[in-house]
Image (cartoon, rainbow, N blue to C red):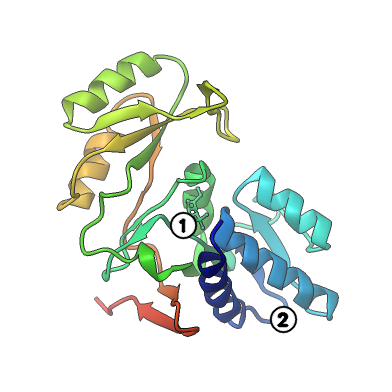
Amino acid sequence: MEEQSVNTRKLAAEKAVEYVKQGMIVGLGTGSTAYWAIQLLGSRVKQGLEIKSLATSTQSELMAHELGIPIITFAETDHLDITIDGADETDESLNLIKGGGGALLREKIVGSATEFYIIIADESKLVNHLGSFPLPVEVVQFGSELSFRKLQTLGCSPRLRLTNNKPFVTDNGHFIFDCACGYILEPDLLHQQLINIPGVVETGLFLNMADIVILGNKDGGTRIIRKQAT
Ligand code: 5RP
C-alpha cells in the first residue's frame, strides 16, 4: 500500500474516533481504513476508555480481541451508538458502494442498527456517480450459476470473486459477484432489482445510511460531508 494512501486513511480514522465516547457500543468496520480506526480505539481503550464493540467481520473481531477491545454480539444488544467503517465509493449524497473487503452483509446489518454511522475514506473515494467500482453482490452458493445469469440480464457484468484461484467465500459462507453495472444513476432501483433475485443476499449499495463521511486528504486535513436533512 502506498504511503500517502495510508496516511489519508489514518487521518480520517483519527477524526472519526473523536466521536466515540465513554460507555458507547461501537461497530467496527472492515478494511484498510477501518483498520486504523480499530487500532486507534485499541489505544484509547488501553488509556481507560470503556466501550463495547461489535465487529463486521471475523478479521476485525480478531483485531479487536488482540487489542483488548471488549466484543459483544447481537445476542446482547439490538442497538449500536456509532459505527466506523470504510467505503469503496461515496457520492456527495452519502450513497455508498461497499463490499470490496467482502464484508458487505455484516456491514449492512451493523450499519442498519447504528444510531450514528460514520464512513471514513481517502478523498479519492468521492465520486460524482457511483459505479466505477464494480458493485459487490453477495449470493448464496446454491444456484449461484443461475444468479449469475440473472445479474447479466439486468445489464450488470458479474464476475465471481476469486481468491487464490478459488471462489472467495464470505464470513457467512456465500459467494460474491463483482458487478460492472456502469454509472449507477438510479441506485434505489438497481438495489431493488438485484435484491429481488432469489439467491441474492445483499448488495453493496448502502443508500441513505451514512450520517457523515470523513475524507482524509493529502494536504493533511479532513473534509466532513454530512447527511442533508430531509
Ligand atoms: C469491506 C468494505 C470496506 O469498507 C471497503 O472495501 C473499503 O476498504 P478500504 O478501506 O480497504 O479501502 O466495504 O467489505
Q: Position of residue 83 (x, y in %)?
A: 55, 65
Q: Position of residue 89 (x, y in %)?
A: 35, 58
2 and 1 marks in contact (CB < 8 Å): no
Label drawn at residue 130: none
Q: Secondary structure at mark 2?
A: loop
Q: Please state if 20 lies on the left or on the right of 194 as rendered.
A: right
Figure quadrant of residue 145: top left
Amino acid on which the number 2 mark rests in the picture: Gln
Q: Nearer the viewer, residue 224 or 124?
A: 124
Which quadrant is the N terminus positioned in?
bottom right
Which quadrant is the C terminus positioned in?
bottom left
Q: Residue under circle 1?
A: 112
Residue for point 83% across, 62% down? 68
Q: Secondary structure at mark 1?
A: helix
Q: Position of residue 56 (x, y in %)?
A: 59, 50
Residue for point 27% across, 63% down? 127
Q: Please state if 208 lies on the left or on the right of 21 as rendered.
A: left
Q: Earlier in the sequence, mark 2 or mark 1?
A: 2
Q: Residue under circle 2?
A: 22
Residue for point 62% across, 46% down? 57
Residue for point 60% across, 35% down? 171
Q: Residues within 10 Å of mark 2 (few under 14, many from 20)?
A: few
Q: Is residue 205 above or below residue 8?
A: above
Q: Residues within 10 Å of mark 1 (few under 14, many from 20)?
A: some
Q: Please state if 155 lies on the left or on the right of 219 as rendered.
A: left
Residue 201 is at least partly visible in this image: yes
Distance, label 2 to label 1, CA atoms, is: 22 Å
